[in-house]
Amino acid sequence: MSLLEVEDLVVQFYTEDGVVRAVDELSYEIERGEKYGIVGESGAGKSVTSLSLMQLIESPGEIVSGEIRFKGQNLLELSESELRDIRGNDIAMVFQDAETALNPVYSVGEQIAEAIRTHKDVTDEEAKEETIELLERVGIPDASARYSDYPHEFSGGMQQRAVIAMALSCDPDLLICDEPTTALDVTIEAQILELLDELASDFDTAIQLITHDLGVVAELCDRVMVLYAGQAVERAPVEELYYEPKHPYTVGLMASIPRIGDEREELTTIPGAMPDLIDVPTGCRFHPRCPYAEDVCMKREPPLMDTDEEVVADDAENTDHVASCHEYTGELATGLDYDIDVR
Ligand code: SF4
Ligand code: MG
């Protein structure tokens, strides 16, 4: 049994213009201690997926169907109080904007100590000691002196470290990080990713990392799923995705990563934009942007397939490398001939 098993998740938003299917039959699983990346452009469904796990989808949004099993238990069947328990103790979240995650009127230390006291039966003194240990652990220098500092006295990177300390205070099994380094500069970003990596192994915490940045995934993750228009288009161990991306969309994303020594004036970007999720393209959703599209792509939706054999991936299983493209259903006449150098 995996730590997290998401199966056929469908999330819709009801708008004046129509029904937006933000997440459409999405399945994936995360193992204990695994670092799992979810990548895509904005609007692909990454954040909606994360919020669904915590059941924080607000009206006019709704989880329509599917299962979210955490340690075997379907979270969609729990009561509000059982959910609150899971949110506090088993699954924690770290968002992009550390500043808004911290309350400006309490000191950083007090906030973390308060979080500890809500989860554990400890004295104020013990909560304070534990807070200082956690702050040290996430790399806040001079942690006991900084305990009483207010959030605005911390730099952006230190605020994010404090938020991570708070998330870890309940010793979660799963830490959901939604664009945790997007607001930070490159040096600080690298430090935070290194910290997350260490913490995942020290605390045996699984990480679900949501990002638009494939570079960030490469730094941290074991496996990755690429989302496009609410669906998974490719899932693979991270190295395979980098060296051998299989879906034309992933290849396009790869080509748009800036590389050291790159002399191209302009980075290759994928032409066009993510489709309107009220009215998704027929067949393969990527076809309006895909340089390899053929007739079949407009007619039939390609399922996720094992990329080595022409076998439809059973989404409930941990298939190694899958992609949804007619190349792998054997239905493309011309086939894919990537002319970009992905490495
Ligand atoms: Fe492109 Fe067709 Fe493959 Fe879709 S199925 S990614 S349109 S080649
Ligand atoms: Mg987002």
Image (cartoon, rainbow, N blue to C red):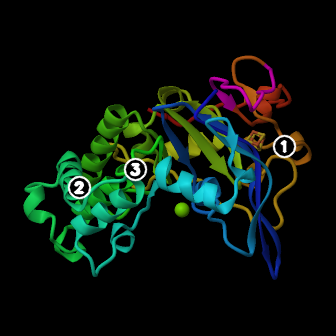
Residue drawn where x is 12% and y is 56% of the image = 143
Q: Residues within 10 Å of mark 3 (few under 14, many from 20)?
A: many
- Nearer the N terminus, badge 3 or badge 2? 2
Q: Is residue 231 visible?
A: yes
The kind of residue on which mark 2 rests is: Thr
Q: Is residue 271 visible?
A: no
Reading the image, the residue beneath label 2 is 131
Whether residue 133 is in magenta: the answer is no
Residue drawn where x is 82% and y is 38% of the image = 302
Q: Secondary structure at mark 1?
A: helix
Task: Kindly tell me whether mark 3's CB lies below 8 Å from ligand 2.
Answer: no
Image coordinates for residue 89, horizontal then vertical, percent: 48, 50
Give the number of the mark in front: 1 or 2. 2
- Nearer the N terminus, badge 1 or badge 2? 2
Quadrant location of the C terminus in the rendered image: top left
Residue projecting furthest to the right: 299
Reading the image, the residue beneath label 1 is 297
Quick one: 49 or 281, which is closer to the camera?
A: 49
Mark 3 and mark 2 residues within 8 Å of each other at the beta carbon: no
Q: Secondary structure at mark 3?
A: loop
Task: Kindly tell me whether mark 1's CB lies below 8 Å from ligand 1.
Answer: yes
- Nearer the N terminus, badge 3 or badge 1? 3
Residue 219 position by quadrant: top left
Mark 1 and mark 2 residues within 8 Å of each other at the beta carbon: no
Residue drawn where x is 42% and y is 38% of the image = 205
Reading the image, the residue beneath label 3 is 170
Range covered by the magenta-colored residues: 310-322
Q: Say left or right for 301 vs 234.
A: right
Image coordinates for residue 24, horizontal then vertical, percent: 77, 52
The CA span between labels 1 and 2 is 55 Å
